Amino acid sequence: RPADTQSHPHGLGRTRPVIVYTPPGYPQGARKYPVLYLISGTTDTEETWFRAGRANVILDNLIAQRRAVPMVIVMPYGNMMMGTPPPTSPEAAVMYQVFSDELMGDLLPYVEAHYRVDRRREKRAIAGFSRGGGQALFAGFQHVDQFAWIGSYSAYLTPEVFERYFPRLAADPAAANRQFKLLWLGVGKTDFLHAQASAFDQYLTSKQIAHRSLVTEGGHTWMNARHYLAETLQLYFK
Protein backbone atom coordinates (compact mmCIF):
# COMPACT_ATOMS: atom_id res chain seq x y z
CA ARG A 1 0.00 0.00 0.00
CA PRO A 2 1.35 3.51 -0.72
CA ALA A 3 2.74 5.30 2.28
CA ASP A 4 0.40 7.60 4.18
CA THR A 5 1.59 11.11 5.07
CA GLN A 6 0.46 12.53 8.40
CA SER A 7 1.56 15.33 10.69
CA HIS A 8 1.38 15.92 14.42
CA PRO A 9 2.14 18.68 16.94
CA HIS A 10 5.13 18.10 19.20
CA GLY A 11 7.57 19.58 21.67
CA LEU A 12 9.32 21.86 19.18
CA GLY A 13 6.11 23.86 18.92
CA ARG A 14 5.35 23.14 15.28
CA THR A 15 3.62 20.58 13.09
CA ARG A 16 5.99 17.82 11.95
CA PRO A 17 5.57 15.40 9.03
CA VAL A 18 5.74 11.61 9.16
CA ILE A 19 5.21 8.95 6.51
CA VAL A 20 3.68 5.65 7.55
CA TYR A 21 3.91 2.44 5.51
CA THR A 22 1.27 -0.22 6.11
CA PRO A 23 1.74 -3.77 4.78
CA PRO A 24 -0.44 -5.57 2.23
CA GLY A 25 -3.78 -6.54 3.74
CA TYR A 26 -3.70 -3.85 6.41
CA PRO A 27 -6.94 -2.05 5.35
CA GLN A 28 -8.99 -5.25 5.30
CA GLY A 29 -7.91 -6.71 8.62
CA ALA A 30 -8.05 -6.08 12.34
CA ARG A 31 -4.71 -7.54 13.45
CA LYS A 32 -2.06 -5.45 15.19
CA TYR A 33 1.35 -5.29 13.57
CA PRO A 34 4.89 -4.87 14.86
CA VAL A 35 6.31 -1.43 14.09
CA LEU A 36 9.69 -0.17 12.90
CA TYR A 37 10.58 3.49 13.47
CA LEU A 38 12.98 4.29 10.60
CA ILE A 39 14.90 7.57 10.62
CA SER A 40 16.79 9.10 7.69
CA GLY A 41 19.98 11.12 7.55
CA THR A 42 21.27 14.65 7.96
CA THR A 43 20.21 16.18 4.65
CA ASP A 44 17.06 14.07 4.26
CA THR A 45 13.37 14.49 4.96
CA GLU A 46 10.64 12.11 6.07
CA GLU A 47 10.26 11.13 2.39
CA THR A 48 13.83 9.95 1.81
CA TRP A 49 13.52 6.39 3.12
CA PHE A 50 10.45 6.14 0.88
CA ARG A 51 11.88 7.81 -2.25
CA ALA A 52 15.62 7.01 -2.16
CA GLY A 53 15.55 4.15 0.35
CA ARG A 54 12.63 2.37 -1.33
CA ALA A 55 11.64 0.98 2.05
CA ASN A 56 8.10 0.21 0.90
CA VAL A 57 9.25 -1.71 -2.20
CA ILE A 58 11.90 -3.65 -0.27
CA LEU A 59 9.47 -4.69 2.44
CA ASP A 60 6.64 -5.50 0.00
CA ASN A 61 8.98 -7.87 -1.84
CA LEU A 62 10.36 -9.48 1.33
CA ILE A 63 6.83 -10.04 2.67
CA ALA A 64 5.75 -11.58 -0.65
CA GLN A 65 8.78 -13.89 -0.48
CA ARG A 66 7.93 -14.75 3.17
CA ARG A 67 11.36 -13.50 4.21
CA ALA A 68 10.08 -10.66 6.43
CA VAL A 69 7.29 -10.31 8.96
CA PRO A 70 4.50 -7.93 7.87
CA MET A 71 5.04 -4.72 9.82
CA VAL A 72 4.25 -1.01 9.90
CA ILE A 73 7.14 1.37 9.14
CA VAL A 74 7.06 4.89 10.60
CA MET A 75 9.37 7.36 8.83
CA PRO A 76 9.58 10.67 10.75
CA TYR A 77 11.36 13.90 9.93
CA GLY A 78 14.57 13.53 11.90
CA ASN A 79 15.89 17.10 11.54
CA MET A 80 15.54 18.60 15.02
CA MET A 81 16.09 22.17 13.75
CA MET A 82 19.34 22.43 15.72
CA GLY A 83 21.85 22.46 12.88
CA THR A 84 24.08 19.48 12.18
CA PRO A 85 26.51 19.00 15.07
CA PRO A 86 29.33 16.53 14.27
CA PRO A 87 28.54 13.08 15.70
CA THR A 88 31.76 13.22 17.74
CA SER A 89 30.59 16.37 19.56
CA PRO A 90 28.64 16.64 22.84
CA GLU A 91 26.09 18.75 20.96
CA ALA A 92 25.15 15.72 18.86
CA ALA A 93 23.91 13.95 21.99
CA VAL A 94 21.83 17.00 22.91
CA MET A 95 20.16 16.78 19.50
CA TYR A 96 19.65 13.02 19.91
CA GLN A 97 17.97 13.74 23.24
CA VAL A 98 15.52 16.18 21.63
CA PHE A 99 14.65 13.52 19.06
CA SER A 100 14.21 10.89 21.76
CA ASP A 101 11.89 13.18 23.70
CA GLU A 102 9.80 13.89 20.60
CA LEU A 103 9.68 10.21 19.71
CA MET A 104 8.39 9.10 23.10
CA GLY A 105 6.30 12.15 23.94
CA ASP A 106 4.58 12.76 20.63
CA LEU A 107 5.35 10.45 17.73
CA LEU A 108 4.90 7.06 19.39
CA PRO A 109 1.60 8.04 21.07
CA TYR A 110 0.36 9.47 17.75
CA VAL A 111 1.18 6.28 15.86
CA GLU A 112 -0.40 4.07 18.51
CA ALA A 113 -3.56 6.18 18.52
CA HIS A 114 -4.00 6.11 14.72
CA TYR A 115 -2.55 2.79 13.53
CA ARG A 116 -3.03 -0.83 14.54
CA VAL A 117 0.41 -1.45 15.99
CA ASP A 118 1.40 -3.86 18.74
CA ARG A 119 2.40 -1.89 21.84
CA ARG A 120 4.69 -4.52 23.36
CA ARG A 121 8.40 -3.66 23.41
CA GLU A 122 9.17 -6.97 21.68
CA LYS A 123 7.14 -5.68 18.74
CA ARG A 124 8.92 -2.30 18.44
CA ALA A 125 12.13 -1.66 16.49
CA ILE A 126 14.07 1.51 15.79
CA ALA A 127 16.71 2.04 13.10
CA GLY A 128 18.22 4.79 11.01
CA PHE A 129 20.83 5.84 8.49
CA SER A 130 23.65 8.30 9.22
CA ARG A 131 22.34 10.92 11.68
CA GLY A 132 19.20 8.80 11.95
CA GLY A 133 21.32 5.86 13.02
CA GLY A 134 22.77 7.92 15.86
CA GLN A 135 19.26 8.98 16.84
CA ALA A 136 18.07 5.37 16.73
CA LEU A 137 20.95 4.13 18.88
CA PHE A 138 20.45 6.90 21.44
CA ALA A 139 16.66 6.54 21.68
CA GLY A 140 16.84 2.76 21.70
CA PHE A 141 19.45 2.66 24.46
CA GLN A 142 17.58 5.29 26.45
CA HIS A 143 14.29 3.39 26.20
CA VAL A 144 15.23 -0.27 26.43
CA ASP A 145 11.87 -0.76 28.13
CA GLN A 146 10.18 0.29 24.87
CA PHE A 147 12.40 -1.07 22.05
CA ALA A 148 13.81 -4.57 21.72
CA TRP A 149 15.34 -4.20 18.25
CA ILE A 150 17.90 -1.53 17.20
CA GLY A 151 19.54 -1.02 13.80
CA SER A 152 22.42 1.36 13.07
CA TYR A 153 23.15 1.95 9.39
CA SER A 154 26.41 3.88 8.89
CA ALA A 155 26.32 5.45 12.36
CA TYR A 156 27.77 5.24 15.85
CA LEU A 157 27.84 6.74 19.32
CA THR A 158 31.05 7.81 21.04
CA PRO A 159 32.16 6.02 24.21
CA GLU A 160 31.80 9.34 26.04
CA VAL A 161 28.13 9.64 25.07
CA PHE A 162 27.45 5.99 25.84
CA GLU A 163 28.99 6.17 29.30
CA ARG A 164 27.42 9.52 30.17
CA TYR A 165 23.88 8.73 29.08
CA PHE A 166 23.70 4.94 29.46
CA PRO A 167 25.91 3.99 32.41
CA ARG A 168 23.58 1.15 33.43
CA LEU A 169 24.08 -0.59 30.09
CA ALA A 170 27.84 -0.33 30.39
CA ALA A 171 27.78 -1.44 34.02
CA ASP A 172 25.49 -4.45 33.50
CA PRO A 173 25.92 -5.84 29.99
CA ALA A 174 24.21 -9.10 30.94
CA ALA A 175 21.00 -7.21 31.69
CA ALA A 176 21.30 -5.30 28.42
CA ASN A 177 21.82 -8.52 26.49
CA ARG A 178 18.70 -10.02 28.01
CA GLN A 179 16.64 -7.03 26.92
CA PHE A 180 17.81 -6.58 23.34
CA LYS A 181 16.45 -9.02 20.78
CA LEU A 182 18.86 -7.53 18.26
CA LEU A 183 21.47 -4.77 18.18
CA TRP A 184 22.70 -4.52 14.59
CA LEU A 185 25.46 -2.37 13.07
CA GLY A 186 26.29 -1.92 9.39
CA VAL A 187 28.86 0.26 7.62
CA GLY A 188 30.76 0.39 4.31
CA LYS A 189 34.50 -0.02 4.00
CA THR A 190 34.88 3.35 2.27
CA ASP A 191 32.25 5.17 4.35
CA PHE A 192 33.68 8.37 5.80
CA LEU A 193 32.30 7.20 9.17
CA HIS A 194 33.85 3.74 8.88
CA ALA A 195 36.63 4.33 11.42
CA GLN A 196 34.27 5.71 14.07
CA ALA A 197 31.61 3.06 13.40
CA SER A 198 34.22 0.30 13.67
CA ALA A 199 35.52 1.81 16.92
CA PHE A 200 31.96 1.78 18.29
CA ASP A 201 31.62 -1.87 17.28
CA GLN A 202 34.85 -2.67 19.13
CA TYR A 203 33.73 -0.63 22.12
CA LEU A 204 30.50 -2.64 22.43
CA THR A 205 32.56 -5.84 22.20
CA SER A 206 34.87 -4.60 24.96
CA LYS A 207 31.82 -3.91 27.13
CA GLN A 208 30.45 -7.39 26.38
CA ILE A 209 27.27 -5.99 24.84
CA ALA A 210 26.03 -8.51 22.31
CA HIS A 211 25.48 -7.27 18.77
CA ARG A 212 25.71 -8.27 15.15
CA SER A 213 27.67 -6.30 12.57
CA LEU A 214 28.09 -6.22 8.82
CA VAL A 215 30.86 -4.48 6.88
CA THR A 216 30.17 -4.09 3.18
CA GLU A 217 31.88 -2.61 0.19
CA GLY A 218 31.03 0.98 -0.69
CA GLY A 219 30.55 4.19 1.20
CA HIS A 220 27.98 6.44 2.82
CA THR A 221 25.33 5.78 0.18
CA TRP A 222 21.68 4.94 -0.13
CA MET A 223 22.72 1.79 -1.95
CA ASN A 224 24.27 0.59 1.30
CA ALA A 225 21.39 1.94 3.38
CA ARG A 226 18.96 -0.13 1.29
CA HIS A 227 21.24 -3.15 1.70
CA TYR A 228 21.26 -2.79 5.49
CA LEU A 229 17.51 -2.27 5.61
CA ALA A 230 16.89 -5.41 3.55
CA GLU A 231 19.22 -7.42 5.79
CA THR A 232 17.61 -6.30 9.01
CA LEU A 233 13.99 -6.48 7.83
CA GLN A 234 14.58 -10.23 7.59
CA LEU A 235 15.63 -10.30 11.25
CA TYR A 236 13.22 -7.93 13.01
CA PHE A 237 10.40 -9.53 15.02
CA LYS A 238 11.56 -13.10 14.49
Image (cartoon, rainbow, N blue to C red):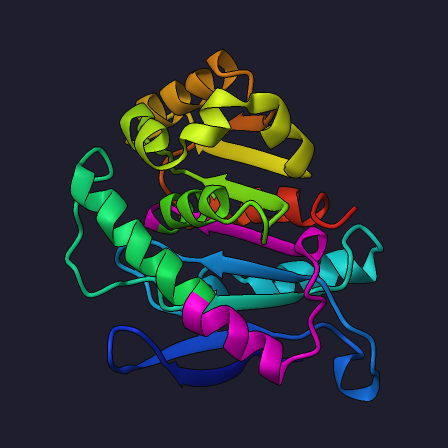
Nearer to me, 17 or 189: 17
At x 46%, y 24%, the residue is: 170
Q: Is residue 218 left or right of residue 74?
A: left
Residue 27, position in %: x, y? 76, 86
Q: Is residue 199 above or below residue 7?
A: above
Residue 122, position in %: x, y? 71, 51
Residue 95, position in %: x, y? 25, 53
At x 53%, y 74%, the residue is: 109
Magenta stretch contains residue 52 = no
Q: Is residue 19 above or below residue 189?
A: below
Quarter holding residue 45: bottom left
Q: Is residue 80 above or below residue 191?
A: below
Specify the quadrant that holds the N terminus.
Answer: bottom right
Q: Is residue 48 visible?
A: no
Q: Is residue 147 left or right of residue 31?
A: left
Q: Which residues are magenta?
A: 105-131
Nearer to me, 168 or 218: 168
Residue 203, position in %: x, y? 42, 18
At x 59%, y 27%, the residue is: 211
Quarter holding residue 178: top right
Give the total number of marks visible in the rendering: 0
